[in-house]
Amino acid sequence: MSKKIYAIVCAISVFGLTMPVYGAQPSADFDQMSFNIREIIEQLGDEATTLPLPYPDADYADPQCHRPIVYIEDGEIYKNGKSLGDDPREYKTTCSGDVIWVDTGGDIYKNSNELGDDAVVFKVAKYSGDVVWLDTDNDIYRNSTKLNWHATTSFEIADYTGDVIWLDRDGDIYKNSNKLGWHAAEFKLAGYTGDVVWLGRDGDIYKNSNKLGWHAAQFDIAKYTGDVAWLDRDGDIYKNSEKLGWHAVEFRMYPDGRLLWKDRDGDYHIN
């Protein structure tokens, strides 16, 4: 048995994968598995295989997801059989068919187009294919456009719109290059609409730059509609700025904007 085949067999054996039958996809925790398999392959040396790992099952069933096939051969990174460049250090794929990658010198690329240099960390928008990244000076970029300076690693990118929400080192919060407010403590992003809900250090709650209320204790945002559900410190429950009731003890915001909550008497409500 060749070393390449042996490497694949060992990896499958270690992680308990079952080979696909008649088109079925293997089941596994790919986020946890992929790093470990790559580590095993690296230890096997130059003759080890570098076959691309499968994507999560959900992506195969998603008609909007068209991830490319990416592999590395002789120090070059390939997308669907076409070379993108040399010496890749890290890469991520998107459902838009793009490959975002960084070479060993820190240059960052979208497919074969260079976006910038000295990249340290990056995140990609799953469907729009946009990328947000920080350089060694903590300058923050969306694709090749510089948004601002002194960013922290507290940033996210909306999967569908490509909007970037980020905090600077003073706690000021931005959407792309527009400042939304000051002294943000935490935030959540709606990936489909690009809306953001965030909490100030004093407990004031905002949707984008609009203040919804005071003394917020818990909050969530609907992925597809951008609606915000939140509780204040007295247990009053709100949807956006509208008070829905009193003495709520728990709630769940669904991605389509529906809100289910329970009051202290055990009664359920849908709004």
Image (tube, rainbow, N blue to C red):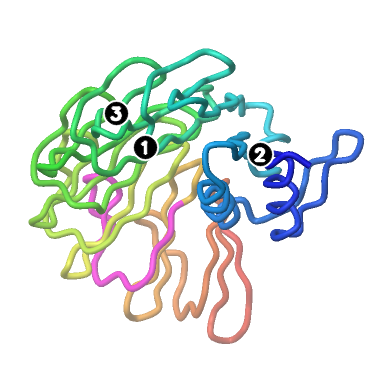
Distance (Cα) linking label 3 and label 1:
10 Å
Label 1, secondary structure: give it. Answer: strand
Q: Is label 3 or label 1 in front?
A: 1
Image spot of residue 106 (x, y percent)? 24, 34
The numbered dot on residue 108 is 3
Q: Is label 2 or label 1 in front?
A: 1
Write down the quadrant of residue 163 in the picture: top left
- Left or right of 216? Residue 116 is left
Bounds of the magenta segment: 205-221
Distance (Cα) linking label 2 and label 1:
19 Å
Residue at 13% across, 57% down: 171
- Left or right of 189? Residue 265 is right
Q: In this view, does 75 lie above or below 190?
A: above
Image spot of residue 199 (x, y percent)? 25, 61
Mark nearer the N terminus (3 vs 1) = 1
Q: Tell me the crowding category of disc 1: few under 14, some 14 to 19, or many 20 or more residues within 10 angstroms, Cα based.
A: some
Q: Is residue 111 above or below residue 230?
A: above
Q: What residue type is labelled 3?
A: Ile
- Left or right of 127? Residue 122 is left
Given contact means CB atoms under 8 Å apart, are the residues at marks 3 and 2 in contact? Answer: no
Image spot of residue 98 (x, y percent)? 47, 23
- Residue at the extreme right of the image, as rendered: 22
Distance (Cα) linking label 3 and label 2:
24 Å
In the rendered image, which residue does mark 2 sit on? 54
Q: Which of 55 and 43 is in front in this view?
A: 43
Image spot of residue 121 (x, y percent)? 28, 44
In the rendered image, which residue does mark 1 sit on? 89
Q: Nearer the viewer, residue 125 or 178?
A: 125
Mark nearer the N terminus (2 vs 1) = 2
Q: Nearer the viewer, residue 202 or 70?
A: 70
